[in-house]
Image (spheres, helix red, strand yellow):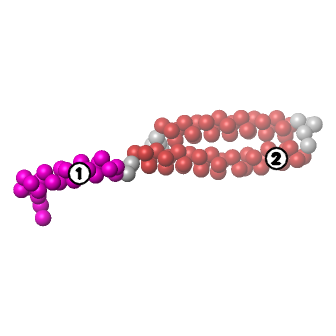
Amino acid sequence: MLVTTLSAQIVLAVFALVYAASVFAAIVAVRDPQASPGLKAAWATALLLLPPVGLVAWEAARVADHRAAHRSVTVVDRTAYLADRAAHVAGGSARV
């Protein structure tokens, strides 16, 4: 089973809905006797390009969640670390 974050699952679900709607619209366009060959070709091209775009959107959501989970050290975090380290040094428990 593929384990993903919630926002990546939402992006994937939205992509699946858009793709399903596009497939339906392409079927309607291709079966329409009044549709021009250019319109039919446009739908076929869109269906070929949609999966890579959806995968890129899903990967972007996954990377954004990963970055949010591993935020960088802030000034407050660094100050707290230095204060803790200074307390250890003052207490004689520092390792050298």
Q: Is residue 75 magenta?
A: yes
Q: Is residue 48 magenta?
A: no
Relative to 40, 79 lies left or right: left
Q: In the image, what residue occupies the spot 85% across and 44% down?
A: 40
Instruction: Farthest residue to the right: give it.
Output: 34
Q: Amino acid at mark 2?
A: Ala
Q: Nearer the viewer, residue 85 or 70?
A: 85
Q: In the image, what residue occupies the spot 69% across and 46% down?
A: 50
Q: Residue 7's mark?
A: none
- Residue 17, image quadrant: top right
Instruction: Farthest residue to the left: give it.
Output: 92
Q: Nearer the viewer, mark 2 or mark 1?
A: 1
Q: Position of residue 15 (x, y in %)?
A: 62, 39
Query: Can residue 77 be spotted in the picture?
Result: yes
Disc 1 packing (10 Å; few <14; some 14–19; many ≥20): few
The residue at which mark 1 appears reads as 81
Q: Amino acid at mark 1?
A: Tyr
Relative to 56, 93 lies left or right: left
The residue at which mark 2 appears reads as 42
Which circle's residue, 2 or 1, is located before the other in the chain? 2
Q: In the image, what residue occupies the spot 62% across and 46% down?
A: 54
Q: Position of residue 87 (x, y in %)?
A: 13, 51
Q: How many marks?
A: 2
Q: In the image, what residue occupies the spot 32% across and 50% down?
A: 75
Q: Is residue 25 above or below residue 74?
A: above
Q: Nearer the viewer, residue 85 or 26?
A: 85
Q: Position of residue 72 (x, y in %)?
A: 37, 51
Q: Secondary structure at mark 1?
A: helix
Instruction: Farthest residue to the bottom: give it.
Output: 96
Q: Please identify the dominant SS of the magenta region.
A: helix
First to last magenta residue range? 73-96
Query: Can residue 1 be spotted in the picture?
Result: no
